[in-house]
């Protein structure tokens, strides 16, 4: 069986959950007998040094079966590829690879229209599409958060979407939905990494019979849980992930300030992440100003430290520095890969009560939930985590290892077949 995996970015170029999961699947499938995976990762002109004159699809770093789709002039409202030459190159690539299964992990930078192109080019191939977020439903970066007031959104509609993006008339949102759904007709099966997404996409209009739940797998980079020598305090907190607006770093920093005002400072917070260039200018300025003020404090009064970006191989070392992982996202995370990363090392998670986070973390069983976007609630949870005797131990010992990349590959192979 030959499987073509299409990913938004390569995880070694841009970190992100969807591309990391796709790459984990690619690696796990390579270890399976009688399976040949091929990886095609879309990139944008920000990586212009990777673009070769006249090329539209090229190899990646000399690695077998790893390729880059050199996207150009992508239309991120309609989600289409305007370049005829790029589409022709994609068709040539499909005919050259001749995959039995084409598994989309995104259409961003490819275009929703390439799903239909795939069906027309390979009429007998099976097409699988993993929904890693809500871009098909929500034009507001797929986050389903209202631009008007920051409230959570549970459905789309022409007028409702127009309120978030008044630069587009209601009829454009109606046509956008029809455009994406028309191309989705070519998909044999959709998968979601969390169960709540199935109901959401079914309400949007996808047939429930074409929706399946497959949890994201995680390559086990730890031979065992991190050793936990007895410590009198469990007061070290860590944020891991992208430093973009909807990941909620600002909520965590507000919670730190709240605790400072209350006179509670017996804790530390470490920020581990990158992609801050993808955040809004206001968000970047907020984080930069906060960290600058923090470094101006005397060493003994500093509560927040920035560790910067990290490679996946460094995760074990970074996790060893903290007791708790904080995931303060202000959108409905589709899976929250950081939860799996924390669990792999036996670290309880403190996270927002939204989406997959609330589905995966059981409050007061294997982690703690707080009201999303509520800095005061997060501050109270941090104080509780620092001061309640035995809380960390009881939560940590109930943590079960996350699904492995091998188990995820087996689940998808069953669906492919």
Image: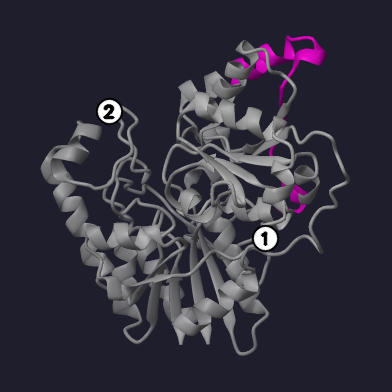
Residue 87 shown left or right of residue 41 in the figure: left
| Coordinates of residue 226 in the picture (x, y in percent) | 81, 53
Q: Residues within 10 Å of mark 2 (few under 14, many from 20)?
A: few
The alpha-carbon separation of the residues under discs 2 and 1 comes to 43 Å
Residue at 47 percent across and 21 percent down: it is: 282
Q: Residues within 10 Å of mark 1 (few under 14, many from 20)?
A: few
- Tell me: residue 169, above or below residue 125: above
Q: Of circles 2 and 1, which is in front?
A: 2
Which residue is label 1 attached to? 61
Give the image quarter of residue 402: bottom right
| Coordinates of residue 110 in the picture (x, y in percent) | 39, 58
In this view, which residue lies farthest toward the left?
171
Residue 408 shown left or right of residue 323 in the figure: left
- Tell me: residue 326, above or below residue 65: above
| Coordinates of residue 416 in the picture (x, y in percent) | 46, 82
Which residue is label 2 attached to? 148
Give the image quarter of residue 181: bottom left
- Tell me: residue 4, above or below residue 8: below
Residue at 69 percent across and 15 percent down: it is: 294
- The stretch in magenta equals 288-315
Task: Specify whether residue 149 is in view.
Answer: yes
Residue 172 shown left or right of residue 103 in the figure: left
Give the image quarter of residue 261: top right
Residue at 47 percent across and 54 percent down: it is: 359
| Coordinates of residue 46 in the picture (x, y in percent) | 52, 42
Residue at 85 percent across and 52 percent down: it is: 227
Q: Which mark is residue 352?
A: none
Name the element at disc 1: loop
Task: Specify whether residue 99 is in view.
Answer: no
In this view, which residue lies farthest toward the bottom?
34
């Amino acid at each position: 069986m030959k499987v073509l995996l299409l990913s938004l970015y390569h995880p070694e170029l841009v970190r992100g959950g969807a591309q990391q999961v796709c790459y984990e699947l690619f690696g796990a499938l390579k270890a399976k007998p009688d399976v040949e995976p091929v990886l095609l990762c879309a990139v944008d002109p920000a990586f212009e040094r990777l673009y070769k004159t006249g090329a539209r699809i090229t190899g990646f770093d000399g690695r077998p079966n790893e390729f880059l789709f050199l996207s150009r002039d992508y239309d991120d409202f309609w989600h289409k590829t305007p370049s005829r030459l790029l589409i022709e190159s994609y068709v040539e690539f499909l005919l050259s690879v001749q995959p039995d299964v084409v598994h989309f992990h995104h259409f961003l930078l490819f275009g929703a229209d390439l799903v239909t192109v795939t069906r027309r080019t390979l009429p007998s191939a099976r097409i699988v599409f993993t929904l890693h977020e809500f871009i098909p439903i929500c034009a507001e970066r797929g986050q389903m958060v209202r631009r008007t007031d920051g409230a959570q959104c549970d459905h789309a509609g022409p007028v409702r979407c127009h309120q978030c993006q008044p630069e587009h008339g209601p009829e454009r949102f109606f046509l956008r939905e029809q455009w994406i759904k028309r191309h989705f007709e070519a998909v044999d099966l959709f998968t979601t990494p969390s169960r709540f997404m199935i109901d959401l996409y079914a309400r949007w209009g996808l047939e429930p019979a074409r929706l399946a739940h497959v949890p994201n797998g995680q390559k086990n980079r730890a031979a065992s849980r991190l050793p936990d020598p007895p410590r009198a305090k469990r007061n070290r907190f860590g944020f891991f992930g992208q430093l973009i607006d909807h990941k909620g770093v600002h909520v965590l920093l507000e919670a730190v300030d709240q605790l400072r005002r209350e006179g509670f400072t017996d804790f530390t917070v470490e920020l581990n992440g990158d992609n801050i260039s993808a955040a809004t200018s206001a968000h970047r300025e907020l984080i930069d100003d906060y960290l600058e003020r923090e470094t101006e404090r005397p060493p003994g009064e500093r509560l927040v430290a920035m560790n910067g970006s990290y490679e996946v191989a460094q995760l074990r070392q970074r996790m060893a520095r903290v007791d708790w992982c904080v995931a303060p996202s202000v959108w409905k995370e589709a899976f929250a890969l950081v939860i799996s990363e924390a669990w792999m090392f036996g670290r309880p998670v403190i996270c927002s009560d939204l989406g997959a986070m609330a589905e995966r973390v059981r409050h007061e069983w294997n982690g703690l939930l707080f009201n999303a976007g509520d800095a005061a609630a997060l501050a109270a949870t941090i104080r509780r985590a620092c001061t309640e005797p035995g809380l960390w131990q009881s939560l940590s010992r109930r943590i079960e290892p996350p699904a492995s990349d091998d188990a995820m590959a087996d689940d998808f192979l069953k669906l492919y077949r």
